[in-house]
Amino acid sequence: MKNTALTQTHEALGAKIVPFAGYNMPVSYEGVNVEHETVRNGVGVFDVSHMGEFLIGGPNALALIQKVTSNDASKLTIGKAQYSCLPNETGGIVDDLIVYRMKEEQYLLVVNASNIEKDWNHISKYNAEFNAEMRDISEGYSLLAIQGPKAVEAMQSLTSEDLSTIKFYNFVVGDFAGIEHVIISATGYTGSGGFEIYCKNEEVKQVWDKVLEAGVDFGIKPIGLAARDTLRLEMGYCLYGNDINDETSPFAAGLGWITKFTKDFVNSEALAKEKAHGPERKLIAFELDERGIPRNDYDIVDGQGKKIGIVTSGTMSPSMGKGIGLGYVPTIFSEVGSKINIQIRKNAVPATVVKLPFYKA
């Protein structure tokens, strides 16, 4: 297992450390519900330094990114970011990622920790045609996510940048916590606002300490990955490995909005046909009608008890106090308001298909 630059700091804070995507990561400090509410109502800080970062540069950088990603990166101007995915050749998804346009001919790709090597190999394979400059800087950089409605107010004293002007999916490169040239971006994964800080490993301890110091009057707390999961699920954000993978198509996963046929990209012809016909199954959001906690891999069954699908993500929503989840079912069961059942041990618990997000601030 690898450590982040802050693993010892988390241990000293009493975090429960678990293996995650090849790293020792803090899953919780005080408990998932407390940490979840801290982010929903105040401000919390996550160490998500396990994420991967690739720099793609040179005259053909955009051409390569356009080939391997589903979204239209030509729309990006410097200072803007874009959610996208890497389609594979067989209709599934290699990974979901964020593309940042750093300079005229330089882009930063932020990928999931468990997929760093897979993504690098996939992009490299197509780069044979474009010969763009590729650098994997994952090992040298750390990433903190400062999330919650009080994040901007709590952190403004740490930077000369006006944090309130950084719109969703925008970023600046500026000073933060006494460090020059850090990326301050607003691509949050919690639905409660805030921003992310990308800095070098040797700088992150200083940033972490100053973030906690600046946030004292706002009730800031360190937050683990368990609360990150419940927060993202309340928003209906996909998690790679659960809700999307090498077998799930962007259209089945509800990611048609990041799949743009304004260009030719990997498997775009087959995906265009799928869009025209409609996917055979869809990722739905559901709420339990009775008490219970849906979990990953539980069966989804119809009124006769026949298996029609599987839960990909599920939890007891801390904000709503009810069981919520995502899962794949045949398209005929995917309409909002449809009734399904979740097989929880011996009980088929009734549930209703709902519109995302589950949580509305």
Image: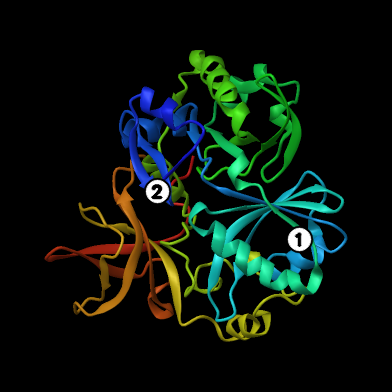
Amino acid at circle 1: Ala
> Residue at 43% across / 63% down in the picture?
243
The 10 Å Cα crowd at callout 2, few under 14, some 14 to 19, many 20 or more, is some
Q: Characterize the local packing of mark 1: few (<14), some (14-19) or many (20 or more) Cα atoms within 10 angstroms.
A: many
Q: Is residue 166 left or right of residue 310?
A: right
Q: Give the labeled residue for mark 2.
A: 20
Which residue is tagged 1?
A: 73
| Percent position of residue 241, x then y | 43, 62
Nearest the eye: 46 or 134: 134
Task: Tell me: 60 left or right of 321.
Answer: right
Is residue 97 depicted above or below 12 in this figure?
Answer: below
The way the protein has been coloured in the rendering is rainbow
| N-term mark: 1 or 2 | 2
**Discs 1, 2 touching: Cβ within 8 Å:** no
Count of number-bearing discs: 2
Residue at coordinates 51% horizontally, 52% vertically from top-left?
113
In front: 229, or 28?
28
Residue 286 percent across, percent down from the top left: 36, 60
Q: Amino acid at mark 2?
A: Phe
Q: Nearer the viewer, mark 1 or mark 2?
A: 2
Report whether residue 70 is seen. no
The x and y percentages for residue 56 are: 75, 56
Q: Secondary structure at mark 1?
A: helix
Secondary structure under tag 2 reads: strand
Residue depicted at 22% across the width and 80% down the height:
306
Say above or below: 350 vs 357. below
